[in-house]
Amino acid sequence: MRFARTVRTAIDTNILSALWSGEESVERVTAALNAAGDRGGLVICPLVYAELRGSPRATASFVDDFLDQMEIMVDWICGKDVWLLAAERYAKYAVRKRKQGMGEPKRLLADFVVGAHALLRADQLLTLDKRLYRRDFEELLLNP
């Protein structure tokens, strides 16, 4: 008997906020979330939870109820390895930007924490901003 391997999918803030805001990508996002949920567990890092709370009209109970309904777990224990990897990749990005004469870094550290968390704690990242992660987390599987 063969057992299917479950795939753990980390979710970027933009995926969940697209659902709430009714963006034109909502059908694609819904399909991608459902497919990821069918393959295994869904998870967000604490930073994504904090960003979700900053959404318009997003109370703590709304966010918590939504995550419960969607069966999305918050990985509250975001260890030192995630922070160290995020710092390493952010530093490389900052050096690259300066060498290219592009001035100071424009991306937020949050993107690097989300990427590091997905790489170390999940099998893939569900995001609408693939290009942001391709260069700095090239080994990270991006979905959809």
Image (cartoon, rainbow, N blue to C red):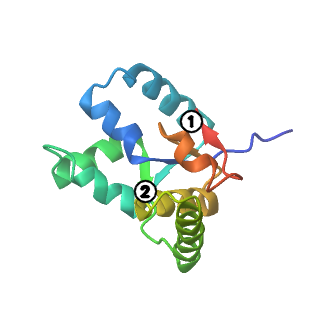
The residue depicted at 48 percent of the width and 64 percent of the height is: 113
- Res. 36 mark: 1
Looking at this view, is 133 or 39 the one in front? 133
Which residue sits at x=59%, y=65%? Answer: 99
- Looking at the image, is 10 positioned above or below residue 25? below
Residue type (three-letter) at the residue carrying disc 2: Arg
Given the current orientation, which residue lies at the most extreme front position?
Answer: 101
Q: Nearer the viewer, mark 1 or mark 2?
A: 2
Image quadrant holding the C terminus, namely top right
Quarter of the image where one finds residue 141: top right
Q: Residue at x 34, y 33 (%)?
A: 18
Up the image or down, 69 lies above or below 27; here it is below
> Going 53% across and 73% down the picture, which residue do you hit?
87
Q: Is residue 17 left or right of residue 6?
A: left
- Mark 1–mark 2 distance (CA, rounded to whole Å): 27 Å
Q: Secondary structure at mark 1?
A: helix
Q: Residues within 10 Å of mark 1 (few under 14, many from 20)?
A: many
Q: Which of the pair 95/132 is nearer the observer?
A: 95
The percent position of residue 37, horizontal first and vertical second, equals 53, 37
Q: Amino acid at mark 1?
A: Ala
Q: Which SS class for mark 2?
A: loop
Q: Is the residue under label 2 in contact with that under label 1 (CB below 8 Å)? A: no
Residue to which mark 2 is pinned = 107
